[in-house]
Amino acid sequence: DWISLVPSATINYSRSAMKRKIALFVVMLSVLLVLPASLEDDWSRLVKKMSNLITMIEDNYYQDVDHEEMAFSSIRGMLQTLDPHSYFLDPRQLMVMQEDYQGKYSGLGILIQKHDTRLVVISPIEGTPAYRLGIRSGDVISHINGESTENISSYDAMLILRGEKGTTVEITINRAGLDKPIHLTIKREEIPLFSVPYAFLLNDDTGYIFIRNFAATTTQEFKEKMKTLVGQGMTKLILDMRGNTGGTFAESVKLSDEFLPKGKKIVSIRGRDSTFNREFAALSGKQYEDIPLVILINQGTASAPEIVSGAIKDNDRGLIVGEDSWGKGLVQTVFSLADNAAIALTTAKYYTPSGISIQRDYSSFEDYRYYRPEAPEEERQVGYTSGGRKVLGQGGISPDYTVTDDFKPLTSSLLLKGAFFGYARNFADRKTPLSKSAVFPGQGNGKTASSEQAIVFDGRFSVNDRILDDFKLYLLEEKIDFENGGFVVAVDQIRQWLGRELISSVYDDIEVGIRFYMQRDGTVRKALDVMPEAENLLRSP
């Protein structure tokens, strides 16, 4: 969730011996800051205390200690006393951060997800090593380099699967319908990591673009998607940044600039050190200043996408639909350490064009991390948009129209267990009773006993009661618990998720399934309803 990724300082330190590797923390303390003379004595005493503590542990602890881990833990503890967004990056975490920023990584080219104890392949990426070797959606990776994946998270599995270009990794796959596992040795290659993965028309003239995060390539990816959609007849845009937790500050400014006329304020940043103070405004010559715009946000929208949302709202350039965003108004700068480690340190606050900070109160880290609702209105900073609308600070970006994203309990449970995905894979493989007579794309009606009763995957496809009954049979066979009462309450969400996964599996195209889902999504539908108001904003003086 850092938004400034340029290493603006390099901090070097040395160690007298490998045995005393833990001492790197003390040395780092002594060189991180150049202190005024009045504070030098206090700082020296602190460093001496730490040095004595390290010696005491080294000499008296009952077993050998991991010096590097102790040093890293000490640094983490120090940063945790500052704010929720200053943190330490060990070499592996720094590698992932840099890959996300650059928009590429070295690996196999698969999307993975944990379903209970199973590590499941959601989809191979076309043209990658995994795709060429025939890895399929629904394959279960049981072992990586001989180690079971049962008790590791999908994040830890990702770290193991990634590595240096040209190196190899061994995986074992269990595939439905095969008696024996598949053993593969795969050479890692450079894989593009798209931050704008989905873009399509929702109807004849309204485009939809989803931005996953903000990386070095985000604005360029966005412009390429826009060019395609405009060529297909798009004249209005819904920009979905729900669940987008941030990325690079520069790209959030560049993306905002695509929509705003020259001279319009985008964001300003202010720090204790005035060298961090900057104001950013739109430049001329951008091509999407006149397209009606609605932005979607939710509680998971944080940092860089909040900059974009704030710039659009405060300039009355478009409408915001969804939930209050997270409220992260702090800017981090990444400072490099030796040994391929780094710290992300908060160096400034940012302010929207109306002059407000959207940073939520973090005096209680626990409340902050679990999303405490915003402060009462009378305690919040007040600003005004260019058109005179009131906006509030200290609580994220507030939508113009509120639509909640809450899942029903059964929907959440079925998602966590991979039930929708698992059923869809079985259906695509014709392993459920209803799927045996289904008419798949390009198949025609010749293979069905009764085309009137068969499920047909075409433009009129919908999740009917027969599919729901077939899904219930799957849940019973897989011993996935559900109650009929809970099923009835969640049935609309269940239909939506079944449609998404069935279409993705049958068409072997994730984006087609997501388009089906978004055409029925409550927040998207509200955005379509208020689009005429977004058009009127463009006509306002």
Image (cartoon, grey):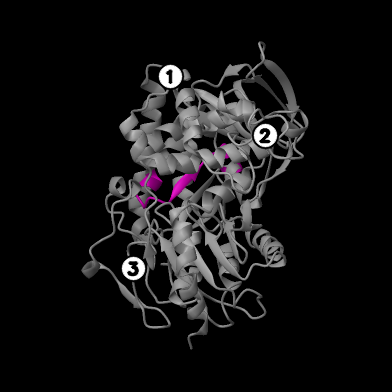
Residue 513 x, y percent position in the rendering = 59, 44
Q: CA distance from mark 1 to mark 3?
A: 48 Å
Q: Circle 1 — which element?
A: loop
Residue 373 sits in quarter: bottom left
| Left or right of 214 on screen, residue 309 | left
Q: Nearer the viewer, mark 2 or mark 3?
A: 3
- Mark 1 or 2, which is nearer the eye? 1
The disc placed on residue 501 is: none
Q: Is residue 450 magenta?
A: no
In the rendered image of this protein, does residue 268 appear above or below residue 185?
A: below
Please indicate whether residue 443 sits to the left or right of residue 376 in the image.
right
In the depicted structure, whether residue 207 falls above or below residue 318? above
Residue nearer the viewer, 113 or 357: 113
Label 1 Cα crowd, 10 Å radius (few <14 / some 14-19 / many 20+): few
Residue 88 within the segment the image draws in magenta:
yes
Q: Eyeballing the image, is 476 above or below 38?
A: above
Mark 3, residue position: 393
Residue 10 x/y as whole percent: 58, 52
* Residue that appears at 70% across and 33% down: 108
Does 228 appear above or below 284? Answer: above
Mark 3: secondary structure: loop
Q: Which residues are magenta?
A: 78-95
Q: Amino acid at mark 2?
A: Gly
Cβ atoms under marks 1 and 3 closer than 8 Å: no
| Residue of label 1 | 479
Name the amino acid, label 1. Answer: Lys
Q: Residue 200, how many percent across, how many down?
A: 63, 57
Q: Name the residue nearer the viewer: 185 or 30.
A: 185
Which residue bears the numbered disc 2? 163
> Is residue 268 visible to the viewer in this orientation of the structure?
no
